[in-house]
């Protein structure tokens, strides 16, 4: 009987040992260090142009407008947009324009004036930073379609 108890305790100890590592079966396949979700850091804010963050927009709503804002995160009004590109799709042809400020360039405004219903534009690679920081983050954006 003493042998049976010893064997039972040994078997229980071995099972407990295996059970302790059962939750980490895939631990060897898990990445080590910082988990990389995308190739860049994405901030919590989103881009706002003419009071909208994307979707259908009437041409009269964006005519002559040049400023971009960020919303959706604390301190968004103090955030500084450092650069962005504007991808315009007009009649199936794509044009990409660049800016190193938080405003549309005169060429961008001119190109937007020529859009017709069904054409679209999207702000891409919008980078921003806090006023007291040199670290930048990418802002979420949505596509606009001219109504």
Image (cartoon, rainbow, N blue to C red):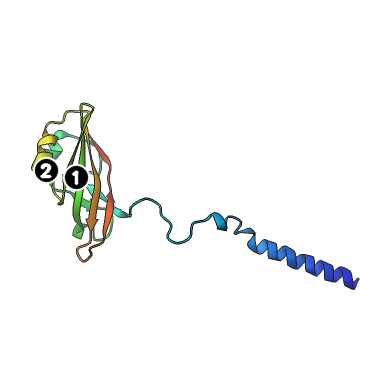
Q: Is residue 64 above or below residue 73?
A: above
Horizontal and vertical percent position of residue 9: 79, 69
Whole-number angstrom distance, CA of label 2 to CA of label 1: 8 Å
Write down the quadrant of residue 4 in the picture. Answer: bottom right
Horizontal and vertical percent position of residue 85: 20, 44
> Does residue 146 appear in the picture of this structure?
no
> Does residue 32 appear in the picture of this structure?
yes
Q: Quadrant of the C terminus?
A: top left
Circle 1: is it few (<14), some (14-19), or many (20+) Cα within 10 Å?
Answer: some
Horizontally, residue 140 falls left or right of residue 114, namely: right
Q: Which mark is residue 107?
A: none
| Residue for point 28% across, 42% down | 142
Write down the quadrant of residue 74 in the picture. Answer: bottom left
| Residue for point 56% across, 57% down | 28
Q: Is residue 4 above or below residue 60?
A: below
Q: CB atoms at circles 2 and 1 under 8 Å apart?
A: yes
Camera-nearest residue between 18 and 48: 18
Camera-nearest residue between 53 and 10: 10
Element type where label 2 sits in the image = loop
Q: Name, please, the residue furthest toward the top.
A: 91
Q: Which mark is residue 49?
A: 1
Camera-nearest residue between 140 and 34: 34
Q: Quadrant of the N terminus?
A: bottom right
Horizontally, residue 47 falls left or right of residue 60, namely: right
| Residue for point 69% across, 65% down | 17
Horizontal and vertical percent position of residue 117: 19, 28
Q: Which residue is under mark 2?
A: 65
Circle 2: is it few (<14), some (14-19), or many (20+) Cα within 10 Å?
Answer: some
Horizontally, residue 146 falls left or right of residue 10, namely: left
* Of pointers 2 and 1, the one earlier in the residue sequence: 1
Horizontal and vertical percent position of residue 104: 13, 45
Element type where label 1 sits in the image = loop
């Amino acid at each position: 009987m003493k042998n049976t108890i010893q064997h039972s305790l040994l078997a229980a100890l071995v099972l407990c040992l295996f059970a302790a590592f059962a939750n980490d079966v895939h631990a060897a396949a898990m990445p080590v260090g910082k988990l990389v979700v995308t190739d860049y850091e994405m901030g919590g804010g989103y881009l706002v142009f003419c009071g909208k963050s994307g979707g259908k927009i009437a041409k009269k709503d964006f005519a002559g407008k040049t400023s971009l804002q960020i919303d959706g995160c604390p301190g968004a009004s103090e955030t500084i947009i450092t650069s962005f590109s504007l991808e315009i799709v007009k009649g199936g042809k794509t044009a990409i324009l660049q800016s190193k400020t938080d405003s549309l360039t005169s060429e961008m405004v001119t190109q937007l004036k020529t859009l017709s219903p069904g054409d679209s534009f999207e702000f891409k690679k919008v980078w921003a930073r806090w006023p007291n920081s040199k670290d930048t983050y990418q802002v979420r954006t949505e596509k606009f379609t001219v109504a």
